[in-house]
Image (tube, grey):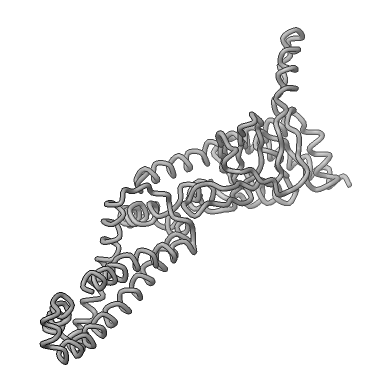
Amino acid sequence: MNGWEMRRLLDLVDQNVEENELRLRGEILRFIKNHEDDVVDRLNREKSVKIPTSFGEFVLNLGDLRNRILNPIAA
Amino acid sequence: MLALLLSSLIAVYLLGPDLVSRFILSFQVPRRNIVQSRGEEVAAAIFIAAVPLAFAAAWAFAGGTLRREGGLDDLANVFSGLYSEKYFEANRQTFFSSLHAFAWMNFSLLWRLYLLVAAIGLAFNWLIKNYNRIWNRYRRGRLKPPVDFLLDSIVLPRISEWHVLLSGMRLPPGPFLLVADILTKSNTLYQGRIQDKMLHADGSLHTVTLASPRRFLREEFHLAQAASQQVGQVPDSSDYWKSIPGNLFVIMGSDIVNLNLKYIRQRPMSLRFNDSETEQTLSRLFERLEGTDQQQ
């Protein structure tokens, strides 16, 4: 593999990042929609909720959510 | 004696710089395993030595050191004395005087050569270490083509493919996780966050360490699939992962059949996307939380 072939591999990594971001976001949103009451309850009680996805468990923190809504960073 | 001297010169001028450059590059990351024939290895060693040697010679000439130490006559005297015993007997005094100059000429070239090789090796290490920062800074600007050329032609070929794949050297800014599904030779599927990796000296994969590891319960899933055909309800594969206690789950590279790598932003919901559904869902969730806060 020369430098340009390695570069193509790295371009695949770039695509991988974008595709996984979309998939993971979709899975998290689906979970939130399907278990909204439970998510709200847990965020109120424990300030965080564990969201199972095919990538593993992700923790959604109340602070992060507040930050995300009030101070969004453009993608 | 002449053969011995020539062998020594080849060793210090060709093999030495190659060895030193490999050693310094290994500080940062193991080199790629490039399978080369003997001829290709020698050609690569000559090329690695030739460029810094040319600069070292120019440096020594420009400073006048090389001319001060000796000249072509001294080289001729040394090689003639080593080649012919008659010449050596007839010019013993001149030979030793020229040998002294010859040694100093080599010394003045060699310390410059090794210094340049070390400096170039350290510069490569810096480029490898800062690849992500450099790439992210210049990937959209006017300097993208020359920076790409520099990184693609000089840096990438010197790095193990496994380091490229299993490190964050080419990710956008922000904290990322690297999640892997790993199928082993025993047909077991593991998943976890790649915590660490170990590479062999030749750049091949030795071990992968997973954090939050879990194992896919394949048999149970297949049984559930078979049962579901009668009931008509498809089982969700995400329910068939069993967490493995511990945070240092090491899988030997030799046991791995294939790897499915997934690069994920550590906080996947932190960015705002042009997607009204996401925004609506999160805003609704936030409003409900704020509403509960106010009620309390």
- Whole-percent x, y for residue B129 in the image: 48, 61
In the displayed structure, does residue B77 sit left or right of residue B285? left
In the displayed structure, does residue A73 sit left or right of residue B203? right
Q: Quadrant of residue B68?
A: bottom left
Q: Nearer the viewer, residue B8 or A67?
A: B8
In the displayed structure, does residue B41 sit left or right of residue A61? left
Question: Could you tell me which residue is drawn at 15 percent across and 79 percent down?
Answer: B85
- Whole-percent x, y for residue A3 in the image: 35, 48
In the displayed structure, does residue B154 sit left or right of residue A22? left
Return the residue found at the far right: B296
Question: Could you tell me which residue is drawn at 56 percent across and 39 percent down?
Answer: B261
State the quadrant of the N terminus of chain A.
Answer: top left
Q: Looking at the image, is B238 positioned above or below residue B152?
A: above
- Whole-percent x, y for residue A48 in the image: 78, 46
Return the residue found at the far top: B230
- Whole-percent x, y for residue A62 in the image: 75, 48
Q: Quadrant of residue B69?
A: bottom left
Q: Looking at the image, is B93 positioned above or below residue B253?
A: below
Q: Looking at the image, is B224 positioned above or below residue B173?
A: above
